[in-house]
């Protein structure tokens, strides 16, 4: 697929030039994060450039169709941007969220931070998976989540890592 910029004066084309991936990345960043742009978001979410896809993945107002495209993404950089968004929290499936937890510590930490906001992820299932994560950074983020059930915070307060236990004790206040 080729992207280009076209300038018209009235009905006459006065300028036309192809856009390279870097220019397209800048264009994607500048697109207003509104539902009415989902047609272009859908196209750009399939672009071969990871950087272009990442600029789209961070938008909050993606519709379900665009979110499903990004949900199947293989790049952790794109997924790191996506996992923080309202669209992800609304449309991402439990299957993908579980896979992402084991894929990348930063993604798992973000999910731990917002675990109660993912609409298609049973919170009890999510917390059990996160509680068994081997990286203390994920546990520390989970322990910082003050909306977490107190029984989990009490378990985290007894963690051998002082950062995890301190975060849990603070959240228990």
Image: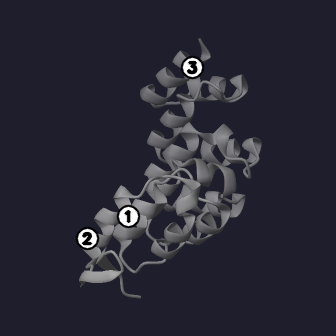
Q: Residue at horizontal 59%, vertical 39%?
A: 114
The nearer-to-camera label among 3 and 1 is 1
Residue of label 1: 28
Residues marked 1 and 2 touching at CB (< 8 Å): no
The quadrant of the rendering that contains the C terminus is: top right
Q: Is residue 77 visible?
A: no
Crowding at dot 1, Cα within 10 Å, few <14 / some 14-19 / many 20+, comes out as many
Q: Answer left or right for 65 relative to 75.
A: right
Q: Is residue 172 visible?
A: yes
Q: Residue at horizontal 45%, vertical 31%?
A: 161
Q: Residue at horizontal 36%, vertical 87%?
A: 2
Q: Which mark is residue 23?
A: 2
Residue of label 3: 171
The relative height of residue 93 versus residue 127 in the rendered view (above or below) is: below
CA gap, disc 3 to disc 2?
44 Å
The quadrant of the rendering that contains the N terminus is: bottom left
Q: Answer left or right for 21 relative to 78.
A: left
């Amino acid at each position: 697929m080729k992207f280009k910029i076209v300038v018209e004066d009235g009905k006459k084309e006065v300028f036309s030039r192809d856009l390279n991936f870097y220019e397209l990345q800048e264009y994607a960043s500048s697109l207003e994060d509104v539902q009415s742009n989902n047609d272009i978001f859908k196209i750009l979410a399939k672009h071969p450039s990871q950087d272009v896809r990442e600029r789209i993945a961070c938008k909050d107002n993606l519709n379900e169709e665009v979110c499903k495209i990004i949900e199947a993404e293989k790049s952790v950089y794109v997924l790191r941007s996506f996992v923080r968004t309202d669209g992800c929290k609304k449309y991402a499936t439990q299957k993908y969220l579980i896979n992402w937890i084991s894929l990348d510590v930063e993604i798992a930490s973000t999910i731990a931070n917002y675990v109660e906001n993912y609409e298609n992820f049973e919170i009890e299932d999510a917390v059990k998976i996160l509680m068994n994560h081997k990286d203390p950074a994920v546990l520390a983020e989970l322990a910082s989540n003050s909306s977490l059930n107190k029984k989990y915070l009490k378990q985290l307060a007894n963690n051998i890592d002082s950062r995890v236990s301190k975060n849990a004790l603070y959240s228990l206040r």
